[in-house]
Amino acid sequence: MIPIVLTWGDILTLRGDALVCPAHKHLICGRGLSAQIYARSGAKLVTQCQLQPECAVGEARLTRAYRLGVDYLLHTVTPQWSSGDQWGAQALQQLRRCYKSVLVLAEQKGLKHLLFPALGAGTNRFPHTIAAHQALAVLTECTGSFEQITICLHTPAALGEWQQVEQQFFSV
């Protein structure tokens, strides 16, 4: 089983092979973590993203990373949480697809250590417990050749929610 490390702090200070960036479908600067990544990476990232095809919800794209503790960025477009209404099931499937798409692309590139934020739980408003369950369901079944997957949460409270989901549903 691939080691999954849950932590909290500033994901931009961590080291790894690739950082997962919540993305806009045109890979332009978004809000939250995306804005921080673009601000730190600068014009080279913008130029490289302009060369990429549109990225639908649940898909992933790979670019080089600039001025970050990783070599690559894995961009994925996360769904909006709609409070569990009639589109809630679709949003859950799309969020899982984000994780799967990132893993496939990372494995194709031979990346070994991935850094994930809480996809969907930021500006897209997924509750952390729901985001954690979707993420861990995909990541714990990953059979790729990864050495470590780190999920970095923004606050200790979010970390606690993810740890609770992990212990309740995914502990061996």
Image (cartoon, helix red, strand yellow):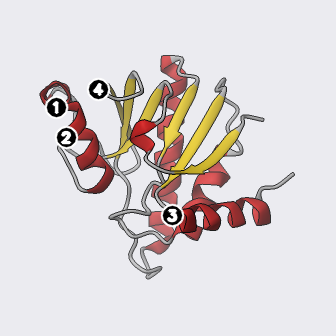
In the picture, the disc for residue 61 is: none
How far across and how far down the image is residue 102, in percent? Answer: 47, 37
The residue that label 2 is drawn on is 39
Marks 2/1 in contact by CB < 8 Å: the verdict is yes
> Residue 67 lies in what quarter of the image?
top left
How far across and how far down the image is residue 72, in percent? Answer: 38, 25
Category of crowding for the residue at label 4, using alpha-carbon neighbours closer than 10 angstroms: few (below 14), some (14–19), many (at least 20): few
The Cα atoms of the two marked residues, 4 and 3, are separated by 33 Å
Category of crowding for the residue at label 1, using alpha-carbon neighbours closer than 10 angstroms: few (below 14), some (14–19), many (at least 20): few
Left or right relative to 146: residue 47: left
Looking at marks 3 and 1 on the same chain, the residue that comes earlier in the sequence is marked by 1
- Considering only vertical position in the picture, is 77 above or below 19? below
Left or right relative to 95: residue 4: right
Q: Nearer the viewer, mark 3 or mark 1?
A: 1
Name the kind of residue labelled 3 in the image: Leu
Marks 2/3 in contact by CB < 8 Å: the verdict is no
- Considering only vertical position in the picture, is 108 above or below 36? above
How far across and how far down the image is residue 62, in percent? Answer: 35, 28
Category of crowding for the residue at label 3, using alpha-carbon neighbours closer than 10 angstroms: few (below 14), some (14–19), many (at least 20): many
Marks 1/4 in contact by CB < 8 Å: the verdict is yes
Q: Nearer the viewer, mark 2 or mark 3?
A: 2
Name the kind of residue labelled 2 in the image: Ala
The kind of secondary structure element at disc 3 is helix
The Cα atoms of the two marked residues, 1 and 4, are separated by 8 Å
The residue that label 3 is drawn on is 92
The residue that label 4 is drawn on is 67
Specify whether residue 54 is in view.
no
The kind of secondary structure element at disc 1 is loop
Marks 4/3 in contact by CB < 8 Å: the verdict is no
Residue shown at 51%/45% (left/top)? 99
Looking at marks 2 and 3 on the same chain, the residue that comes earlier in the sequence is marked by 2
